[in-house]
Image: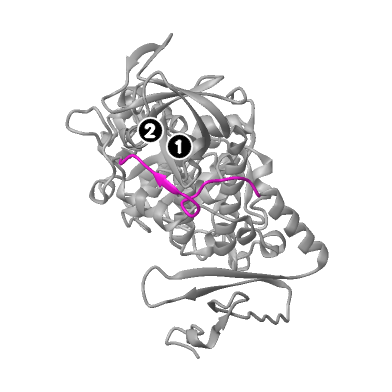
Amino acid sequence: MEDDRNHQVAQGDVFEDVDNHGNDCYRVIIQFTGRMFGSFSQWVIFDFGTYPVLVRKLSVEVGSQDVLNVVKSLHQKYLFDRWTSQNCKIVRQPEPSNPTDDQLLQKYKAPDASECLITQDIIIAELNCNNYIHKMHKLLELEELTRHKIISSFNICTTVQIQNNISESAGSFYARPGELFMRVPLSDNLTEDTNAGQLILTSVKKIWFAPLNQGRKRVFEANILDSSNYGFDGRGKEYIYLCVPPVCVQALGLEAGSNVEVEIQFQMNRLHFCRMHFAIDCLQNIDIVFPYTKNVNPSFKQDTALTHVSSKFLNEDQMKVVQHIVAERVGYSPPFIMYGPFGTGKTETLAQATMMLIKESKSARILICAQSNSAADRYIVKYLDKFLKERKLEDKMRRVYFKERRVNTVKLEVQKYCAMTERKDAFSPPFREDIMQHSIVITTVETSLELLHLNLRGYFTHIFVDEAAQVLECAIIMPLSLATEKTCQVRYFTSSMATKAFTHAYPGLILLLTSA
């Protein structure tokens, strides 16, 4: 029978049986009939009247033998030893956290088994407007699982040294009360020359470890020493230093000067992937990534002042780009893509378009996103700071940093556009009322997601994404999720390879800029 939510429900006594040893059991026979090729899955829930309930996911692949062989081989490829919260208990040190980040980590779980993730639909089905959100979630999970597997090459069973102090050429210091240090020898040199080394250096801040003599039922978490805990980079070429928290020290009875045999697994910071999952779910207009090309109308109103803009800094082709950006368009206009080699004036073009919009339109609200902080700051230092000073409009621009960024690493001419604490020693997180008081907002692609949490979708009239080819497509969706059908969106690339990934979505809308 079905419940009020169209779930198939059966009473448990229907499945009561006796096993070969005469014990009571439940025997559920599953039957499946497929009339088409594809991947099919269904959740079965066993509810015994109390929580928690038992859950099992059933999956069936229906297809040609060749395709099924490929799926099977990929299942084997992604089989590797990995601890998760599903197969062991993780003992963590309580740490201050961001509630928003905690919610994302809770909502978007780490991919577990490759059998559930890798299906023929993921391999065969083309990305289209109907399956985009579902398939991008699956591709992100596959990318995350791939990175975990690469990082796992540094996982090791070894003997570690427990210390209460560190004395290296970079400095000497003692552990805080209750904490100890763990010196871990590595199985390979830790450098950026390998994929695994690069991922560990950029994406790993924690490790999980378990004493070899205590099995794997309980796994402990420790932080790699860095600027956020001891002001010391604990990542050497042949070893790393870990900060073992008091809860682990006490549970394992660790003492300074002892050696312990442990198994260690490096843990990638998943937050970046969770943010991309969230951005995909916030993508309300699929035509942002799959425009309705038959409805494209590139014309614009001829009687507006913005139609006749000019600039002594730009050539004819660049002015066509600016005209497309600043003019009020008529009818449907999809995202605009601009690409070309280094030095062809793409950043200059977007900067000039920004300045023209501010001069000619009081209602313009512009979001500029770059792949890196240095690229974002360049818009201020090279172009907008001088422009706003001359017109006494410095209060119209806001530079948004993530709050952990150290103030002393930011140039003074950029700091004045930032929201900071009263002591001016840290950046303040953005809030809605402050952002809405500014006509220009500049940030990185990933930090733009903070604006989505502030319910600012539709606030910006123009969204510019700088060097979009250097980030994953799902990351570009972070700022684009703030757009509506009325938002002008511009992305530019320096790599012709990047255009291939988008040509299916934006035919005829790619403009090659000539030399500036």
- Look at mark 1 in the image and give the residue it sits on: 351
Residue projecting furthest to the right: 66
Spot occupied by residue 84 in the image (x, y as percentages of width and height) = 50, 49
How many neighbours does mark 1 have within 10 angstroms: few (below 14), some (14-19), or many (20 or more)?
Answer: many
Spatial CA distance of label 2 from label 1 is 7 Å
* Residues marked 2 and 1 touching at CB (< 8 Å): yes
Question: Disc 2 designates what residue?
Answer: 384
Most frequent secondary structure within the magenta stretch: loop
Look at the image and give the residue range highlighted in magenta.
79-94
428 left or right of 67?
left
Quadrant where the C terminus sits is top right
The disc placed on residue 246 is: none
Residue 486: in magenta span: no
Please tell me which of labels 2 and 1 falls first in the chain. Answer: 1
**Which residue is depicted at the point 36% across and 54% down?**
103
- Say if residue 368 shows up in the picture: yes
Residue farthest left in this picture: 422
Q: Is residue 435 left or right of residue 483?
A: left
Picture residue at 70% right of the left edge, 49% below the top: 77
**At numbered mark 1, what does the secondary structure look like: helix, strand or loop?**
helix
Out of 496 and 296, give the one closest to the viewer.
496
User: Vertically, is 271 above or below 285?
Assistant: above
* Residue 380 locus on image (x, y percent): 38, 31
